[in-house]
Amino acid sequence: MPPSSEEAAIPMEEICPICKGAGYFCMDVPISDPNFGHLITCQCKLAEKEGRQRDKLWQQSNLQAFETKNFDTFNTHVVGVSEAFTRAKAFAQAPKGWLFLYGTYGCGKTHLAASIANEAVRREYQTIFMVVPDLLDYLRSTFGPNSEVAYDERFEKIRNIQLLVLDDLGTESSTGWAREKLFQIINHRYNHRLPTVITSNADLDKFDPRVASRLSDADICSQVLIKATDYRQTTTRNNNIRYK
């Protein structure tokens, strides 16, 4: 029997030997067996579905510019980063509550936050990584005449995502609209105890008091001060790694 046109398009060595490229098969069992005549999803089909799911999670994550930022490429030998590295890695293993990483420019906050996000995607958590000013632009873009996504849809996705990583809180514009949108996102995730990672160069007293209050709640948020100084040049010279 000649192969179907779909099978013919697949090189013979790539056709699954179990289902012959159909994606499903029937078990060779007696009529009395409850599985007789039932279509079984083949492992190749399941693997294909899982691959599509991983691709979808990756595209949604906004991590394309940070794909090399992971725990293996983080320089743990720099003085002042060990506690933050340990806490970030533990959070990535089982995202729960909030993690607030703060410190001066160049101390590794963004690298650690992106490492958490990359690990979460690998573990198939629905994750979004956003630099805060970019997040606000992302929301504003829905008001444009050519936007194919409604504001409410995008806003709901951001505030309800399984893991949200907000990088550089405090660098956004201080307009009333920006403050209110950020508060609504943060407050919603606070009320629903949704896993969230936030980084900042600023101390809590520089934030909207409502946001600072929620970041100060030790029942949900772990604060980690990264004491390392700006060591971009040092780490670039020693490890070819750049930090933010």
Image (spheres, rainbow, N blue to C red):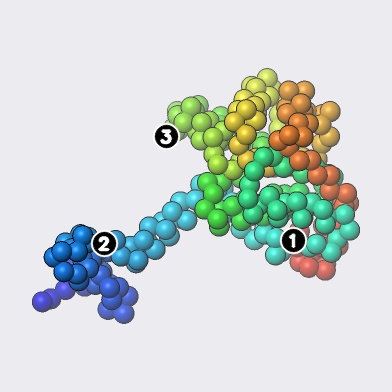
Q: Nearer the viewer, mark 1 or mark 2?
A: 2
Q: Which is more N-terminal, label 3 or label 1?
A: 1
Residue 211 percent location from the top left of the image: 73, 27
Residue 69 percent location from the top left of the image: 67, 58
Q: Residues under labels 1 and 2: Cα distance?
A: 44 Å
Per the rendering, the mark at residue 40 is 2
What residue is shown at x 52% (from left), y 53% (from top)?
124
The residue type indicated by label 1 comes to Phe
Asked whether disc 1 touches disc 2, contact meaning CB atoms under 8 Å apart, the reply is no
What residue is shown at x 19% (from left), y 64% (from top)?
33
Asked whether disc 2 touches disc 3, contact meaning CB atoms under 8 Å apart, the reply is no
Residue behind mark 1 = 74
Q: Is mark 3 on a helix, strand or loop?
A: loop
User: Where is 147 relative to 126, above or below?
Assistant: above
Location of the N terminus (image quadrant): bottom left
The residue type indicated by label 2 comes to Ile
User: Where is 122 relative to 196, above or below?
Assistant: below
